[in-house]
Image: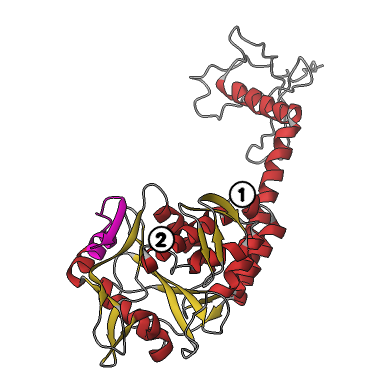
Amino acid sequence: MPSRHRRPEAAPSAPASPARRSGRQQELPTFSPSSGTSTTRTARRTSGSSRTTRRPVAQAAPSGNGWGNGSNRSNRGMLSGAALTRRHPVRRFVAILLLVILLALVVLAGCGWFWINAKLTHEQMLTDAPGSGATTWLLLGSDQRDGSPGAGQDTSITGFRTDTILVLTKPKQGAASLISVPRDSLVKQDGKYMKINAVAYTSGYPSLTSQIEDITGHKVDHVALIRFGGLSKVVDAIGGINLCYDADVNDPQSGMVWSKGCHQADGGMALAFTRMRYSDPKGDFGRADRQRQTISAITSKVLQPSILLNPPAAGKVLSAGLDSLIVDERTNAIDLVRMLLAFRSASGGKGITGSLYWTNPNYYPNWRVGSTVLLDQARNTDLFEQLAQGSHAPGTVGGI
């Protein structure tokens, strides 16, 4: 009787060497962080069979320098990073908080720009002259001839006068500059001689802009007009400014009462400070110096963190400033910020300030116009060419 023979079971084969397993993908062990042993379950499907086999893998022991292979060292690094995150939840919280704050600031800034642009009063002030490399702002201060203190003594003169004319230039490289144009500078408009401060009233703001472009030889990119009546509100909104004048003054024409030295000025005192000229030995040139000082003091204080980072204070200053401001047809909120930064730069120790050059500060073209300032056109053209190129050294310029 034939003996029954049980089919011998295949003996487990020994682990193949790398050379013998060259045609088969090597399976790398994975290790569980919660136990001292590890098992890899590998599913393989052979052709013609759907059966899944599981192979036990010998436990891998850590080597002397860490885990047994590079893959496992990477896994341990990932686990360590996860553990580190769990150990330092404050870091994640701070990062998320900073992101939220940044997004909030962006939203507030965007809302601020829209609000400022909506509040701006625009007027046609620019010409179609070709642009230049530098950015130029024409800053004007206007007084109404309404009989208010310091606003004008001749009751036969009506309307307004741009008694403050400043040219702010920011080159691509080099120092920013702030140059005063004497209010009595002699110009010719529509074939007639007149003082430059009357051009805007008689012929419009584009005509005044064109006169400045003729004097400087460069295009005016932006115009900002400040009504002197609103200046006091701005100064009061920022809590006053520090002003200095080295003489005692009691001037009934402007209302300025001053003792020699530096004082904290409120809005009314700052307004008188910018208007006074009859008690100044330098006349209108001295007044131009004090006007630059006043605007510089306002700009510096407005840009302090105590105002910029204080929404109620910033809103109060913006409202007061925008109510007294008129800008050209193209200026927006970003242009105003750039103007303030350029003004602060020009007024600092590395900036350039002063006035136009002239040949005669008491020139009489005819009896109707009266005493005027005769400008030195050649020197002024050369001056603004250097200012636009950024090649002029910091300091004070202008005069005879």
Q: Position of residue 34 (x, y in %)?
A: 79, 21
Disc 1 and disc 2: Cα gap in Å? 27 Å
Q: Which mark identifies residue 289?
A: 2
Residue on which the image places disc 1: 305
- The answer to which of 293 and 269 lies nearer the viewer is 269
Indicate the position of residue 288 as horizontal and vertical percent values.
Answer: 41, 65
Instruction: Report the quarter where the C terminus lies.
Output: bottom left
From which residue to which does the magenta span run? 383-400
**In this orientation, does residue 110 appear?**
no
SS assignment at label 1: helix
Up-down: is 57 above or below 304?
Answer: above
| Residue farthest along the bottom direction in this orientation | 191
Residue 38, located in which quarter of the rendered image? top right
Give coordinates of residue 39: x percent, y percent.
Answer: 73, 22
- Work out whether 68 lies above or below 261: above
Quadrant, the N terminus = top right
What residue occupies the far top of the structure in this picture? 64
Label located before the other in sequence (1 or 2): 2
Residue nearest the observer in this picture, 93 or 340? 340
Name the amino acid type tagged 1: Pro
Identify which residue is drawn at 65% across, 41% down: 48
Q: Is residue 172 magenta?
A: no
Q: Is residue 211 visible?
A: yes
**Residue 147 shown left or right of residue 285 in the figure:** right
> Which residue is depicted at the point 39% across and 55% down?
346
Q: Nearer the viewer, mark 1 or mark 2?
A: 2
Furthest toward the right, the residue is 1
Q: Residues within 10 Å of mark 2 (few under 14, many from 20)?
A: some
